Amino acid sequence: MKRTFRMALAAAGIAGVMAAIPAYADDLKGQWLFDTSKFDGDCMIKGVMTFTPTPTPNSYTCLFISEQICGPLKGDLYIKVKQSCTATKIGSQVAVKSAVAQIIEFRPQGFVPGYWADNFIVTMSKSRTEMIGGHYDEQRQLKAHFWRDVDLIS
């Protein structure tokens, strides 16, 4: 009886842990957070991207909001941008090609913003919860990091 109870308790514990790990039937579909390495001294880009599968296998549409955040070296420049994109996944590689849809917010006042589309070539980790690679636009190439925003259950 005690052994049966312990086995049931262990099985319930394993099931609880497995339920806490997200199962991604489509490992790219959904929401991802991202950021880039620093550039121009004290600037970086971060954002949230959502991938939606298309009828074509391994092809996605995506939308995202990116924020370019710079410190005092660049006059505390801030630009928030809405972008549309397409993504192609081949094996563990993901290529994202973007277009700027709208500049949502910027500072300082009086600054006239221009913004180049954020494009990425990244590699998905074996856990399918992280992608590492590069960001590129018309001016620069940076390191890029994507990750799933997963709430951990304690």
Image (cartoon, rainbow, N blue to C red):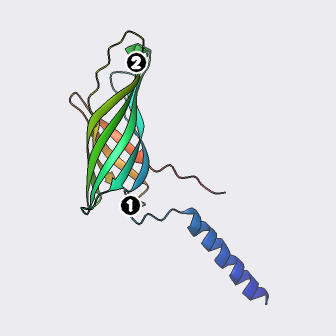
Can residue 128 be seen in the rendering of this structure?
A: yes
Spot occupied by residue 37 in the image (x, y as percentages of width and height):
37, 34
Image height of 101 relative to 93, above or below: above
Q: Quadrant of the N terminus?
A: bottom right
Amino acid type indicated by mark 2: Leu
Amino acid type indicated by mark 1: Asp
Spot occupied by residue 17 in the image (x, y as percentages of width and height):
60, 67
Q: Earlier in the sequence, mark 1 or mark 2?
A: 1
Mark 2 secondary-structure assignment: loop
Residue positioned most to the left:
138
Mark 1 secondary-structure assignment: loop
Residue at (33, 47) in percent of width and height: 62
Q: Badge 2: how crowded within 10 Å, few (<14), some, or many (20+)?
A: some
- In whole angstroms, how far apart are the C-alphas of marks 1 and 2? 35 Å
Spot occupied by residue 74 in the image (x, y as percentages of width and height):
38, 15
Spot occupied by residue 11 in the image (x, y as percentages of width and height):
64, 78
Q: Quadrant of residue 97?
A: top left
Q: Are marks 1 and 2 in contact (CB under 8 Å)?
A: no
The residue singled out by tag 2 in the image is: 77
Residue at (29, 25) in percent of width and height: 115
The residue singled out by tag 1 in the image is: 27
Q: Quadrant of the C terminus?
A: bottom right
Q: Nearer the viewer, residue 30 or 147?
A: 30
